Structures are given as C-alpha cells and as structure tokens.
Image: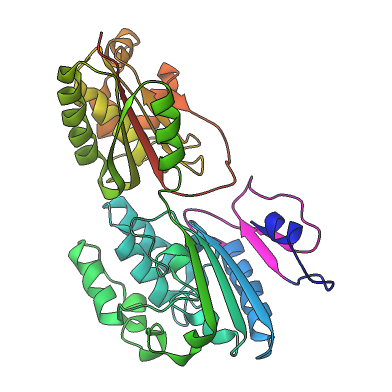
Amino acid sequence: MAQALEEHWPFSTPPVGVAVAPEGYSVQTKWVETMTAAHPHPDDRSVAAAKKVASISAGLRPDDLLIVLLSGGGSSLLSWPVDGVSLKTYASLLRQLMAVGADIETLNAVRRHLSRLAGGKLAQLAKGAHIEALLLSDVVGDGASLITSGPVSPDATTLADTLGAIKRHGVGVSAEISAALADPRNETLKPDDPVFEKVSTQTIPSSVWIAPAAELLRAEGYDVRVIAEQIGGDAAELAHMHASVAIEAVRDGRPVALLSGGEATTRLRGDGEGGPNAEFCLELARALNGCSDVWALACDSDGIDGASNAAGGIVTPSILDRAAAIGCSVNDALSRSDSAGLLKALGDAVVVGPTMTNVNDMRVVLVNPT
C-alpha cells in the first residue's frame, strides 16, 4: 500500500510517513519509513510503531493532509495501551478472548477502548487536519470501525458494552482492565464528534475476490453458487453447512462451484498448529466422509491462518484414508487444535508466504460428479 502511494504521489514535496507491517511483509520504499511489529499478538515493537504514528499525527496543522492506509492486522501492529494498562495485561486479555473464539466485534471493542489510537483517537490527534482514509477490509460487513479498530473512524460502542462483552465470553477481568473500562477518558469518539467532519473514508470490500473467482470457474464449466460473500461464525459450523450444500449439489449431477467469504473463528483446545481455515478443511472432510465428488480449498488471503505459517489447506476425497495410512486421526488433530499440522503431514497445506494483501477468508468447494 505504501509503495502504491509513492508510485502515484502527485506532489513535488515527498510525503512524510511510516508504514507498519508484520515480519516478512516489508518492501522497499523511497520516502515512507517502514517498521515491523507483531501480529496477531502485539509486542514492544507494536507500541513503538504506534508512538511513531502518534508523533506524526500530533505534529500536523489544520491545513495539512493526512493519508491513512489501513488493512486487517493493524490493530495488533499499532497497539499502545491506555494509561494504567500494561502491554502484558492487554495482550493477555486479547489472547484469552481469541482462545475462547470471541468474534471480531468483541476483540475490536476491547482494542478500541484500551488502545490509544483506536476508536477515532488518531483522528483526534491530527488536530483538524484533512484525513483521507483508504481501507482494505478483511472483516464481515466491512465496518470502518472494525478495520485496524477504526483509528480515524467513529465508534458506537461504549466502555460498558466492552466490559459486558468480555464477561459474556467468560473471561476474567483484571483490576487494570476494570479500572480502564471505568475511566471516561478511554471512551471512543462517537459519530457526532466534529473531528470527523474533515475525514473522508473509502473502503475496498472484503469480498472483492469473489467476482473474479466466479468468472474463472464459470469459464471452466462450473455452475457457480455464492453461499455468502461475507459470513462469519464457528469454523466447524461453517464446514458442516458447506458440506450439506455440497452433498445436495452432488445429487444434481452437474459440476458446481460453491464460494463463500468472511472470517471464521475457532476455539483453542490445545497447543497444536492450526487456524480457522485449516480447521474448516478438516471439519469439512469429516462431514463429507470420503465423498468422491467433492474437493475444496480454504485459505486466509494474507497467507497466514491463525497459529500457522500456512494460509490454509485443500480437501480431497482421499484425505481421511491418507490420514489413517500415516497413523493420524482427524478427530485427534481437531481436539488438539493441530489442523494445520495434519494438513502439512499430508502435503495438503497451502503455504504461500506473505501475499501483500489482506481481504477475507476464501472458501471454494468444487463438486465434480463422477
């Protein structure tokens, strides 16, 4: 994104700015400083990056232009907890919520209220400068407040909403967190705040991949059916729903391609190597139970699926038999959150490295009746 900005920069004066990305995503830029930070769990580099961004924004004047390029993952990359909350406590809370399968709305409500730049606070720091925000969405609904936790976007949720969401997921609230969520200074900026009068936002939707994928598959002779452009929820439940639709399509006797986008979630049950897309693959294989006519792919568009260096995996009719042949059990892998580990052992993991983009999860199920 920073490279594209520099390539299309229309002014004679070079831009001053910083681009923050995870390890492996940095590219060569002419003017924009590049920094790396941790994802999906923040570290000290995330705090340093957030402080750098805050410093640039705080130095602006009302007639300056601030261009903000955001994509998924920025919530972790720009993590600078509010006063009274340590990075360790903040990161621990997010880990606990992820482990119990908390949805992105809950995670980002926490981030917006407990991080100094989220929830419109970056826009507030900019002191009335003109802000052009270009967002690359990876979330269901493409809500601006969910992408990088909305540093230049208003937030309708409250401190009380956030505390309630944490408790609903059964996660304990430490004294640090409780105090911070009771402090009105940590409230986010609301839609009627005048700071947003000088903010313009454009969003590239997370389902941007579906139309070209559908065109490609139709050219290959498939009847393309889009289950949902954006759908969230538990990976296992999504897999079983896709399997039901696929089995029904097998009975139709025609080549069918099922597409769905969105962002699945999963519960952490062990210390294995896995992620929601890999789990979707194994749950789909289990639900299809060796159906000879169905193949599938499930991947995260950024190339990293959960706690794995794989983007996701593929499902073939022989996956259960091949797992048994090497002494592995799909049920065991799922019980240990080691879905990606099993896919790698079978040669069915999709490992592509950083893709330099981040829209949403991509699920493609192909039905090829014999």
Residue sitting at x 47%, y 72%: 86
Give the magenta-colored segment's residue range: 17-43
Residue placed at 34% from the left, 70% from the top?
109
Q: Quadrant of the N terminus?
A: bottom right
Total tally of numbered discs in the picture: 0
Q: Which residue is drawn at 24% across and 34% down?
A: 239
Helix, strand or loop for the magenta stretch, by majority: loop
Q: Is residue 104 above or below residue 67?
A: above
For the point 40% across and 65% down, which residue is it? Answer: 146
Residue 156, by quadrant, is: bottom left
Residue 76 horizontal side relative to residue 274, left or right: right
19 and 220: which one is in front?
220
Q: Position of residue 93 (x, y in %)?
A: 36, 64
| Along the line of sight, the residue nearer the viewer: 191 or 258 | 258
Q: Residue 338: tell me if it is visible.
A: no
Q: In the drawing, does residue 9 fall left or right of residue 190?
A: right
Residue 319 or 255: which is nearer the viewer?
255
Residue 267 at what x, y percent from top left? 27, 46
Q: In this view, does 21 lie above or below 236?
A: below
Q: Residue 367 falls in which quadrant of the image? A: top left
